[in-house]
Amino acid sequence: MKKYSRLVWDNALNMVIMSVLTGLFAGVVVTFYNILMSLGEGTSEKLYSMFLENPAFIPLLFVGLAAGALVIGTLVKLVPMIRGSGIPQIEGAARGVVRFKWYITLTSMFAASLACVVMGYPAGAEGPSLEIGGCCGSATGTLLKRNQMVKRLQIASGASAGLAVAFNAPITGVVFALEEAFRSFSPQVFICAAISVVTAVVTRNAIRPAMGFGVGFAFDGFEFAQIGFGGSDLLFFLWVALAALIVSLAGVGFYYLVFATKRLFKKISFLHGIGKYIIPFVLAGAFGLITVYSLGGGHSFIDSLSSHGEGEISVFGIGLIASLAVIVVIRFITAVMTMGCGVPCGVFIPMLAIGAGLGAILSLLFQMGGMDARYGDYLIIICMAAFFTCIVKAPITGIVMVFELTGQFVNFLPALLGIAIGYLIGMLFKTEAIYEKNLEQYIADEKLYDKVRKIRLELKIMANSKADGAAVRKIVWPTNGLVVGVIKEDGKESVADGETVLHAGECIIFECETDDEKELLDYMYSIVGKQ
């Protein structure tokens, strides 16, 4: 018993140390990355202002964008892991489906996405931050020569830390790891992710003030009114339902347009397919000359929509609603192009910006129809979350994000209603989680399943192993694997389910699809013990 307790303690201590190291690495790298990205946004705004002041040089802008697009396209062709936001690929790596070299992916995504922002592309930092964080987790596991199970846990933990640092939203980071990266609420995943996130956010909040940057909430200009159950308050629930319905339908359109655009871009063979990157970059350049709100990820645009936002939004001097509509359409087109073409930059914040912009338009229209203006900020954020949930299919992340990114921890029910509608509309129109669908396409494009074969293993559970005394559902098994049966010590075989508790001396029958039998066995031995 003492030996077992000591083994459990040693495993737990080892996992804590690994997660702390992952959090430190991710915290430092992702913090500096986000600082450079914010500086890059400022640089691009100055560049575009300069071109507007000197129209004769505008042709040079498009020549530069075309040249930059070819460089970015070449890098993506050489390092497919950085295609798009990188979120689907790092999720695949956390599940053991995708393999990559952490140092190549980290440096490539860092450089490529930063270059996109400097060129004025509407790129977010959150997706790349998640992938860079995952690379930091992979580095920790690889450099310390840990087994595949630990590496996968650290990739997921690093990804969570990367997202948390980018948003300064630790709970959102942890929930995203559970809901998206592993799609499992395993205690191991939770503990590792939580420790890495806390360490990374503390590191972030130590570095940023030292360099003269703030550490506050991502969108602190929004203010939520207290909502009770009076007449006007109950009417607000109807406004929320209508707004969420409209925004979710826009989300369904976004989803299908992304994959239609993917099919179109696949047909472009100019310069071995690299030439297709010219289209979104040139288009983004043209939009950047129209309005500064089309540049960057969309933080400033979302902030400006709040009741405490600075400045009046205007495009070519037209009215506010028309200006918002122009910006939303521009951001909608560029985000679809980004995901369709696979430009190495984030679409996490750009998607939120589209949802928030739609919410702002609906808020103004609803106020004309009688909605109390004090509900305006809350409706905008609810629409932002509903749009995100409809596309990403991560409702828990959506509801946590509403409150954590704004610092307004009140009025749960309206947000829950809006997000539930967003999720249901996505189900009704048969949309899949967009990152999950992109991962499937990435696996197909890279032909990762060509060498995969189905393997059936019969393994004995050793005393004091991770599986000894654990329920099946509490163990992080290899991806695409399933415990199909348990053979008791007396030789009797039974069907296993999630609640089946495993004991030393029993044998499990495990079926799994893999392209590396040795790696699978190493992983399984780390669970059931060396045979």
Image (spheres, rainbow, N blue to C red):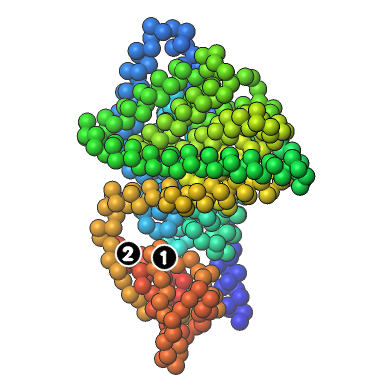
Mark 2 surroundings: few (<14), some (14-19) or many (≥20) residues within 10 A: many
Q: Residue at x 33, y 75 (%)?
A: 456
**Across the whole image, how many numbered discs are drawn on residues?**
2
Q: Is residue 311 visible?
A: yes
The picture places residue 81, in percent across and down from the top left corner, at: 36, 44
Q: Secondary structure at mark 2?
A: strand
The picture places residue 253, in percent across and down from the top left corner, at: 43, 40
Quarter of the image where one finds residue 28 = top right
Quarter of the image where one finds residue 240 = top right
Give residue 514's mark: 2
Q: Work out whether residue 504 or residue 470 is closer to the camera in this orientation and state it.
A: 470
Q: Work out whether residue 25 or residue 100 is closer to the camera in this orientation and state it.
A: 100
Which residue is situated farthest in the bottom direction here? 490
Q: Secondary structure at mark 1?
A: loop
Cα separation, mark 2 vs mark 1, equals 9 Å
Residue 228 shown left or right of residue 329 in the figure:
right
Q: Residue at x 44, y 49 (%)?
A: 429
The picture places residue 449, in percent across and down from the top left corner, at: 28, 58
- The residue under label 1 is which amino acid type? Pro
Give the vertical position of 190 relative to 409 (above or below).
Answer: below
The picture places residue 487, in percent across and down from the top left corner, at: 42, 85
The quarter in which the C terminus is drawn is bottom left
- Asked if marks 2 and 1 touch (Cβ < 8 Å), the reply is yes
Q: Residue at x 59, y 59 (%)?
A: 191
Mark closest to the chain's N terminus, 2 or 1: 1
Give residue 478's mark: 1
Give the vertical position of 386 relative to 448 (above or below).
Answer: above
Residue 410 shown left or right of residue 429 in the figure:
right
Give the vertical position of 456 relative to 234 (above or below).
Answer: below
